[in-house]
Image (cartoon, rainbow, N blue to C red):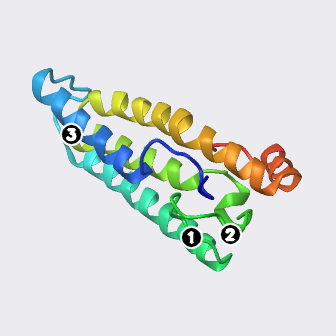
Amino acid sequence: MPDRAPIIAPPPLLGLLCIALGFVARHFAPLTLFPGTGFIQLLIGSALVVAGVSIILLARQAFISHGTHPNPYRPTAALVTTGLYRLSRNPIYVAFLLIVLAFVFFENSAWFFASAVALWCLLRFGVVNREERYLGDKFGEVYHDYCERVRRWI
């Protein structure tokens, strides 16, 4: 048995899949939210992308500084509980959700909100639950104590 969580797919791929599904759904049945696309929507979408990318970079740096790799297909060498991981057990996945939500504003489409909900479900049940079991087995009480102190999402 490999020393890693048995996740359903790479989380970035799940995010891209949900964005693609949003575009497909919007093509066949547009569900606009705002009267036109304007500067404010572009600004909000851009802010969400910048926040998401910043979170990913900071979280990735926390992994590297602890001597482990953020790739869920590699063994976890250390439990990261500092930096953004003091606030959320899954900041990178929160960032993926923010990036998908940015498309609500970029594309003026409710389908991307539905895509974010789909991504949350895929992450929660296909990735996070499996990672939590793996980390619980690997780090035991230390991980369980961390789970009691820090929320899963935000």
Residue at (84%, 52%) from the top-left corner? 140
Residue at (37%, 56%) from the top-left corner? 49
In the displayed structure image, the side of residue 21 where residue 117 appears, left or right: right
List the residue tagged with mark 1: 69
Q: Earlier in the sequence, mark 2 or mark 3?
A: 2
Residue nearest the observer in this picture, 8 or 45 = 8
Instruction: Confirm whether residue 9 shows in the render.
Output: yes
The percent position of residue 112, horizontal first and vertical second, equals 30, 34
List the residue tagged with mark 3: 107
Residue at (21%, 26%) from the top-left corner? 32
Q: CA distance from mark 1 to mark 2?
A: 8 Å
Crowd class of label 3 (few under 14; some 14 to 19; many from 20; radius 10 Å): many
Residue nearest the observer in this picture, 33 or 92 = 92
The answer to whether marks 2 and 3 mark residues whose Cβ atoms lie closer than 8 Å is: no
Amino acid at pointer 3: Glu
The answer to whether marks 1 and 2 mark residues whose Cβ atoms lie closer than 8 Å is: yes
Amino acid at pointer 2: Ala
> What numbered label is drawn on residue 77?
2
> In terms of secondary structure, where does tag 2 sit?
loop
Note whether 145 is above or below 110 in the view shown.
below
Q: CA distance from mark 3 to mark 1?
A: 34 Å
Note whether 7 is above or below 51 in the view shown.
above
